[in-house]
Image (cartoon, rainbow, N blue to C red):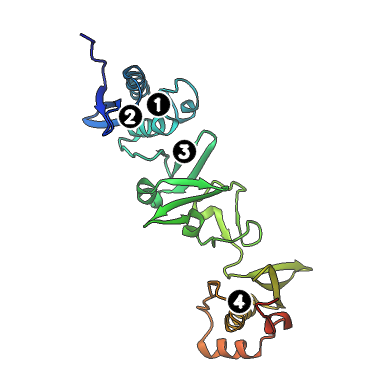
Amino acid sequence: MTKKLAGVQKAVKKDGTVYYRASITFRGKHISLGSFASAKSANAAYLEAGKILADPQYLPSDAEEGSAALSYQKKISLINFRDNKLYIANPIYIRKRYFEYHYAPGIILKFDQDDLFYYSSHKIQKRGGRFFVADYALQTGIGVRYGIKTYAVEGRDYRFVNGDPLDFRYENIEILNTYTGVSFTEKNGQRTYTAKIHLNGDFVIGRYKTPEEAAIAYNKAVDIVKKAGVTKQYVPNYMENISPSEYADIYARIKISDKICHYSLSV
């Protein structure tokens, strides 16, 4: 009779394939460690988990090395549970004033404690260099949560104060431009705001003295190209600091590039 290995449970898939589940109980909590192809590998995961939970000197930085029986992210969850007495399935480690989300070895994102509940229940993913979460079946870039628009450009529309693009603490994110389609250049202390719209390439709408004028010019350009038959969905700019009458006055007098005014789908 084969001896049952500690922390291992045999299971069978619907197609008859046998696999093995590993789990461990710590501080009265039953923790799943994953599924494995063999009882031996499942037991190895159980043994490694036991060592991590019993060794307070085993730090998050140690999770990058050692046995591969457990995934890097599972190791982080166990270390956090051991040190902070809070089990979170996502790879989060809580620090004194913030927490870390260990996406992968060497890729550690930082967030304020206020975001702990959100990232405990939303797994961070990455595609094409962009971090996002699946929120109600939609892929939402995590920067959106901090006022960074989907197509914003770092250095032009926002910046990370300490230079760390993985540090999403609120104090570290400075929004330089709040409007869609607007950028600025600065010369001799004077800023010029340029409005652009993307059609079959980037079209310059015009250059303006204030960001509000540029933003309204963008909105006006959107209205013009839609009347020309463009069906692309554009995100309009909203002006909270301008009254409806002021908006209407600027909209009426603002000048738009002739290329936009006479735009045709045949262009």
Residue 124: horizontal and vertical position, in percent?
A: 45, 46
- The secondary element bearing badge 4 is classed as helix
**In the rendered image, which residue does mark 1 sit on?**
70
Q: Earlier in the sequence, mark 1 or mark 4?
A: 1
Look at discs 1 and 4 and give the one toward the viewer.
Answer: 1
Q: Label 3 sits on what residue type?
A: His
Amino acid type of the residue that numbered disc 2 sits on in the rendered structure: Leu
206 is higher (above) or lower (below) than 249: above
Q: Which residue is mark 2?
A: 33
Please give the residue where the numbered disc 4 appears in the rendered image.
Answer: 215
What crowding class fits label 4: few (fewer than 14 Cα within 10 Å), some (14-19), or many (20 or more)? many
Quadrant (top left, top right, bottom left, bottom right) of the C terminus? bottom right
Q: For the residue carrying disc 1, how many other residues have a C-alpha within 10 Å: few (<14), some (14-19), or many (20+)?
A: many
- In terms of sequence position, does the residue under pointer 3 or pointer 4 come before the other? 3
Instruction: Farthest residue to the right: give it.
Output: 188
Q: Which residue occupies 46% across, 27% down?
A: 63
Give the Cα distance between marks 1 and 3: 15 Å
**Marks 1 and 3 in Cβ contact (< 8 Å):** no
Q: Which mark is residue 102?
A: 3
Q: Amino acid at mark 4?
A: Ala
Q: Nearer the viewer, mark 1 or mark 3?
A: 1
| Lower position in the chain sequence, tag 2 or tag 1 | 2
**Mark 2 touches mark 4? (CB < 8 Å):** no
- Distance from Cα at disc 2 to Cα at disc 1: 7 Å
Q: Earlier in the sequence, mark 2 or mark 4?
A: 2
Q: Earlier in the sequence, mark 1 or mark 3?
A: 1
The type of residue carrying mark 1 is Leu
